[in-house]
């Protein structure tokens, strides 16, 4: 009986010690504050993944600030506007600092505008506050190879952006009005996000690009520096003491995922987005060299 009691006491003591160790380890982990890192790279074709990451970091109480690394020439208008709005909501709850890479132009700058602070390298290409729509015209080729098309439509301007015919002046005027409206939305978004007078933004919103140094001079960004400098700015804004833990979403594919068909599905999805982006008619906030 005594041996049994000793064994029970030893087990209980062991459990208490393990519990105390886990508690201390957990406290040590919790003491280290965290910064969420989100990357937006390449053309902006969709907003879903970026918005999901922003929302997750915003709701996570252990994440004290967010650094958004932008290396993008921009892309579709609507996804850029959706990311802008999500950042706008987030800065009301915690700091969002943008770190610009080699390029953060047009839509890449649009999504950066509402951030708490923007940090760019001196040689970063940014700005390009403008809108573009490209419509190929293959009428000459069709005529050359002897292919004709018949169009049945119920609206006068239903096919005004067709690649199979020349655009009429009135149709061009309609499309130009649409682009001018979307351009004005861009100008207002930058003015609001950066706290700049509307007319001042309008003066530089002619599609031109700026280096990071030039952008700093005209207050399109707040500081010159790299991603480490952006993290330091985020630390300061969030009042983080010591070295924070940098947290980012990592996509990992295992052999099991490959067998389940996840990788081919993702590849197919990305391919469809790229094809759709460059073959369909879209108004873009995009820098095109």
Image (cartoon, rainbow, N blue to C red):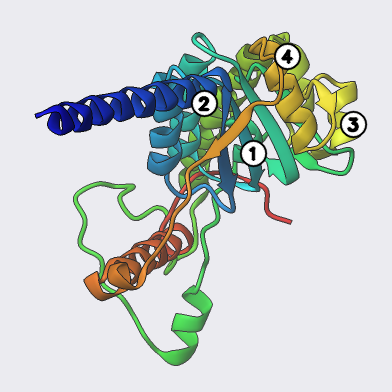
> In front: mark 2 or mark 3?
2
Look at the numbered disc 1 and give the secondary structure of its residue: strand
Percent x, y for residue 129?
A: 68, 34
Return the x and y of residue 56 as percentages of the image width and height. Answer: 39, 29
Dot placed on the residue nearer the N-terminal end, 1 or 3:
1
Q: Earlier in the sequence, mark 4 or mark 3?
A: 3
Marked residue nearer the N-terminal end (4 or 1): 1
The answer to whether mark 4 and mark 3 are in CB contact below 8 A is no
Which residue appears at 46% of the width and 29% of the height?
54
What residue is disc 4 on?
A: 236
How dense is the environment of label 4, judged by Cα within 10 Å: few (below 14), some, or many (20 and up)? few
In this rendering, would 145 be left or right of 228?
left
The residue that mark 2 highlights is 29
Query: Crowding at label 3, few (<14), some or many (≥20) Cα neighbours within 10 Å?
Result: some
The x, y position of residue 134, in whole percent, is 55, 55
What separation in Å lies between label 1 and label 3 (alpha carbons)?
20 Å
Say which residue appears at 86% left-offset and 25% top-offset: 216
On residue 214, which mark appears? 3
Distance (Cα) linking label 4 and label 3:
25 Å
Q: Residue at x 71, y 34 (%)?
A: 99
Q: Position of residue 254 (x, y in %)?
A: 37, 67
Viewer-proximal residue among 288 and 160: 288
Is 98 above or below relative to 76? above
Return the residue at label 1: 69
Using the numbered discs, state the Cα–Cα distance from disc 4 to disc 2 in whole angstroms.
21 Å
Mark identifier at residue 60: none
């Amino acid at each position: 009986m005594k041996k049994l009691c000793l064994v029970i006491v030893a087990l209980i003591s062991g459990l208490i010690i393990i519990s105390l160790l886990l508690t201390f380890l957990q406290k040590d982990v919790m003491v280290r504050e965290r910064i969420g890192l989100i990357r937006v790279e390449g053309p902006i074709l969709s907003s879903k993944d970026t918005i999901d990451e922003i929302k997750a970091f915003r709701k996570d109480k252990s994440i004290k600030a967010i650094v958004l690394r932008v290396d993008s020439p921009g892309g579709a208008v609507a996804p850029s506007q959706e990311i802008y709005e999500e950042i706008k909501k987030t800065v009301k709850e915690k700091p969002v600092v943008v770190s610009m890479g080699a390029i953060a132009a047009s839509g890449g700058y649009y999504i950066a505008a509402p951030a708490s602070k923007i940090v760019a390298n001196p040689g970063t290409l940014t700005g390009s506050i403008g809108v573009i729509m490209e419509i190929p015209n293959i009428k000459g080729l069709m005529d050359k190879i002897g292919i004709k098309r018949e169009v049945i439509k119920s609206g006068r301007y239903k096919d005004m952006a067709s690649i199979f015919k020349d655009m009429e002046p009135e149709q061009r005027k309609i499309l130009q009005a649409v682009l001018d409206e979307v351009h004005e939305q861009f100008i207002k978004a930058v003015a609001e996000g950066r706290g700049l007078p509307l007319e001042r933004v309008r003066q530089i919103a002619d599609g031109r690009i700026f280096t990071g140094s030039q952008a700093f001079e005209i207050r399109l960004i707040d500081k010159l520096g790299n991603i480490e400098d952006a993290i330091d700015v985020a630390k300061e804004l969030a009042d983080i003491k010591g070295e924070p833990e940098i947290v980012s979403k990592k996509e990992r594919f295992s052999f099991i995922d490959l067998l389940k068909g996840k990788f081919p599905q993702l590849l197919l999805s990305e391919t469809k987005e790229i094809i759709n982006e460059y073959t369909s008619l879209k108004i873009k906030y995009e820098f095109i060299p």
